[in-house]
Amino acid sequence: MKDFLLGIEDDLRSKGNYCCYCLQPQDGKISCCQENHFVPFDDLYEEDQKALIEEVTTEYEAWSKTQ
C-alpha cells in the first residue's frame, strides 16, 4: 500500500501546478478561482496534499469495484 501511495504522490507531482484555492491542476489555464496562484504539489499545504491523495485513492477504489 505504501508503494501505491508513493506512486500517487509521484503522479500528482508530475502533473505540474495546482490552484492554491481549489486544488485543481493548472492544465494550461492562466487563472482559476478568479486568481492566478498556482504552485507545485510539494508547495501545497500538507493537508491539501493529503486531500488530493485521498481524492485519487477514492476514485481508484470506486473504479476498481466496477472492474
Image (cartoon, helix red, strand yellow):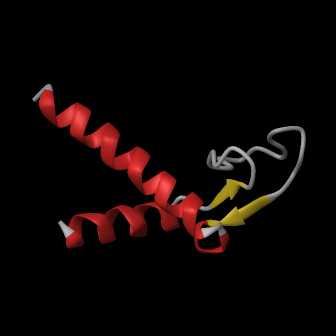
Q: Is 60 on the left or on the right of 44, as rendered?
A: left
Q: Position of residue 28 (x, y in %)?
A: 71, 47
The quadrant of the image that shows the C terminus is top left
Left or right: where 13 falls relative to 60: right
Residue lying at the far top of the rendered structure: 66
> Could you tell me residue 39's position as x and y percent?
72, 65
- As drawn, is 53 to the left or to the right of 43? left
Name the residue rendered at 64%, 67% in the picture. Answer: 45
Q: Residue at x 74, y 55 (%)?
A: 20
- The percent coordinates of residue 27 (x first, y second) are 65, 47
- Please report the residue visible at 59 percent of the width from the left and 74 percent of the height from the top: 42
Q: Nearer the viewer, residue 37 or 26?
A: 37
Residue shown at 63% from the left, 45% from the top: 24
* Quadrant of res 1: bottom left
Q: How many marks?
A: 0
Residue reaching furthest to the left: 67
Could you say which is closer to the camera, residue 43 or residue 25? Answer: 43
Q: Is residue 39 above or below residue 27?
A: below
